[in-house]
Image (cartoon, coloured by chain):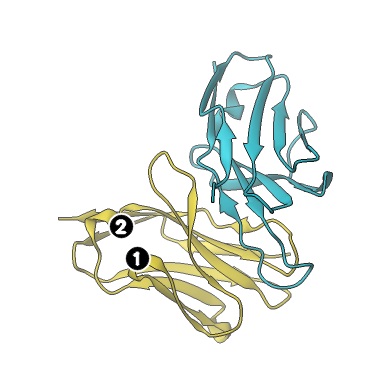
Chain colours: A cyan, B yellow
Amino acid sequence: EAGVTQSPTHLIKTRGQQATLRCSPISGHTSVYWYQQALGLGLQFLLWYDEGEERNRGNFPPRFSGRQFPNYSSELNVNALELEDSALYLCASSLGTGGTGANVLTFGAGSRLTVL
Amino acid sequence: AQSVTQLGSHVSVSEGALVLLRCNYSSSVPPYLFWYVQYPNQGLQLLLKYTSAATLVKGINGFEAEFKKSETSFHLTKPSAHMSDAAEYFCAVSGTGRRALTFGSGTRLQVQP
């Protein structure tokens, strides 16, 4: 079974540009989560998509956005890049349990974004 | 709201020594608790999870964790450290449903030869 795949592995942009990161969940998983892991700041929750809709977002400005496609893959867009956006962006997916039980997230290897 | 606090951003042990990584949680509902491990330049891998079935949870690679409600703790232990255990470890908490996990700040484990 293929795991969660993310692309690109590395991305270098300059300030003000836009970045697009992509994620393919495990087959059968309908929920996709995005986290930002910046140096020294741990994992910060960005966005959660389920069944094509944004269900929740973390404390990030609107220039962080994304979407989930009918095949449940997802992309994260970061507009007007700032230096502090440099981080490892992790995508995770889950099957969910219909509203009960533990929600086990399976993570991809991440996309490292560097903003110069 | 739920949160976890990991005590100690860096822990160093000798090979063969006991590993103890501390995690305390705060939750208004019965929590689900997780430990994940992150090796350099990789994503997070699930070590173990607590889902209220048993308070002592065994995970992969010889790790285990004990849920103690009275202490609101979920510490991770391994009897004998191996060099390959060197990594960053994250404790996480969630409630029911598909909500995102809330992670602690992580503990970097160093294993000295």
Question: Same subunit under labels 2 and 1?
Answer: yes
Question: Disc 2 designates what residue?
Answer: B85
x then y, percent, for residue B12: 27, 58
Write the residue at 74% across / 43% down: A72
Q: Earlier in the sequence, mark 2 or mark 1?
A: 1
Is residue A26 shown left or right of residue A50? left
Image quadrant containing the N terminus of chain B: bottom right
Q: How many marks?
A: 2
Write the residue at 72% across / 28% down: A77
Q: Amino acid at mark 1?
A: Asn
Q: Mark 1 packing: few (<14 Cα in 10 Å), some, or many (20+)?
A: few
Question: Disc 1 designates what residue?
Answer: B61
Chain letter of the residue beneath label 2 in the structure image: B
x then y, percent, for residue B43: 49, 45
Residue B36 or residue A69, whichever sits in front: A69
**In the rendered image, the vertical position of residue A34 relative to residue A100, given as above or below:** above
